[in-house]
Image (tube, rainbow, N blue to C red):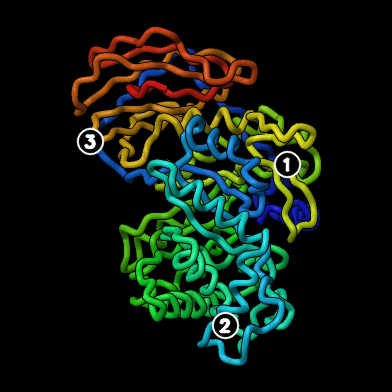
Amino acid sequence: MRRLIGALCLVLLLITSGCSVLSNPFRRPPPPPVVSEAVTVRVNGAAALQQIDGFGVNINGMAWGEGTVIPALDALSDDLGATLFRVVVDETDWEQQNDNDDPQQFNWDYYQQIYREPKFTSLWETLRYLEQKPGSQVILNVMGRVPEWMGRTVITPEAEDEWVEMVTSLVVYGRNEQGLALRLFSPLNEVDLGNPEGPKLDPQQYARLARKVVDRLDSQGIGDIRLIAPDTAYSDRVPEYLAPILSDATLMQRVERVAFHNYGGAIDGIPQAIRASDYPTLRFWVTEYSRWCEGCLTDPAESEQWALGADTADYLLYYLDRGASGALLYEGFDSYYHHHGRLEYWGILSYDERDGSFAPRHRYHTAAQIFRYVRPGMLRLAIENPEPDLKLQAFHDPVSGAFTLVGRNPVDHGVTLTVELAALPTITALQLTQTTETAPLVSAGAAIPVDGRVSIELAADSVFALSTLDQ
């Protein structure tokens, strides 16, 4: 995940890897963005690209605290506009002693005792609360190291079936005893990175274990679980981990989305690998994303930077441009992770331990500019944009007729943007909302009339949305 990237940058000074802690001293920095004071673009409604599944956040499933996180969950869903939630189990070590000598036979007396402990009652309530949110899609993810007797930082070959029994017992109990929907499951985390984010597995072992998981769930009458895979730490490892998954036709019937994590803003190679496969329409999600923030591991002040919020919005616009159908910010709110052994400050909502309150940071506001106005079911449309430093993405919902243009003006001056609308149903008015460092989510006020084209004034260094949707 995020933890080792800073350390790797310190070691690999001469590698142009895009690490955000140090840059290569022998490579010139990229030129600053250049955008004219007046720009005209054309949105082509006849050129539809990918369909959007939604956007969301990662949630620590251990943080329920008798419902103290409900205000945060409500803000993320009802105000931010998140519809995707990746709920994390931290760590994957709950079966400290083997439940029995037969990995094909659950010892439910043993597992029921574990799943009634506070760690799991917190998980069940978090999942239950999020599942009842309209339009939500909830991913159950298992993160961190496995029990010592299974290998701790690896899964030994002789322990594979025992590990499968452990993680599938979680799903079976949640479905049958807790009455949860549990439709999406990510059983492993960052296996290309390994300790402490998950056990280190090669691509063949990952695919083998994923297949065993779906086979075991099938044997329990739970054949509707869909996998989010492979959830790698490094986006450039995705094609390698995807290859053995793609070669298993039975397993592929259960893969809902290709998934990976990215903190560097570059994912080239993944769309190409999918298009070149036997499943060219398979969609992909970035299940953890943000601009890298070394200081967020220990210092809440680092999470408050405007540049962090603006750059993270840039990343999302880039993922969309490359064909992503969904993306989930890391993370929803500040929380304590056992596999790191500390409270961290990656949350787009800060947490005040003194009174238990939550407050939005810049990344919350810049994400809201996109999450609120680019809704599930929308289609991304082609844009003719003569100035690529002005990052723009357009979307249209063929069912409701809703239209949205989102973007980022990265320069230190205002820009007059004229948008020509072609091959779209008649749009008579649009609403402009902008976020800057000092003014989050500011509406322009009255709706802006549209007659085939519209001109708006973009604030300097801003993230914006121009939409028919009223938020």
Coordinates of residue 418 in the picture (x, y in percent): 36, 16
Residue type at tag 3: Pro
Q: Give the side of residue 59 with respect to residue 85, left or right.
A: right
State the separation of the CA atoms marked 3 and 2.
Answer: 50 Å
Q: In front here: 359 or 63?
A: 63
Coordinates of residue 425 in the picture (x, y in percent): 19, 25
In this figure, which residue is indicated by the disc labeled 1? 345
- Residue depicted at 50% across the width and 68% down the height: 171
Eye-nearest disc, 3 or 1: 1
- Residue depicted at 74% across the width and 79% down the height: 148
In this figure, which residue is indicated by the disc labeled 2? 107
Residue type at tag 1: Tyr
Give the image quarter of residue 350: top right
- Residue depicted at 52% across the width and 46% down the height: 328
Coordinates of residue 46 in the picture (x, y in percent): 21, 35
Query: In what quadrant of the picture does the N terminus appear?
Result: bottom right
Question: Which label sits on residue 398?
Answer: 3
Q: Is residue 186 visible?
A: yes
Q: Which label's residue is closer to the chain start, 3 or 2?
A: 2
Q: Which label's residue is closer to the chain start, 1 or 2?
A: 2
Q: Residue furthest bottom?
A: 101
Question: Which label sits on residue 230?
Answer: none
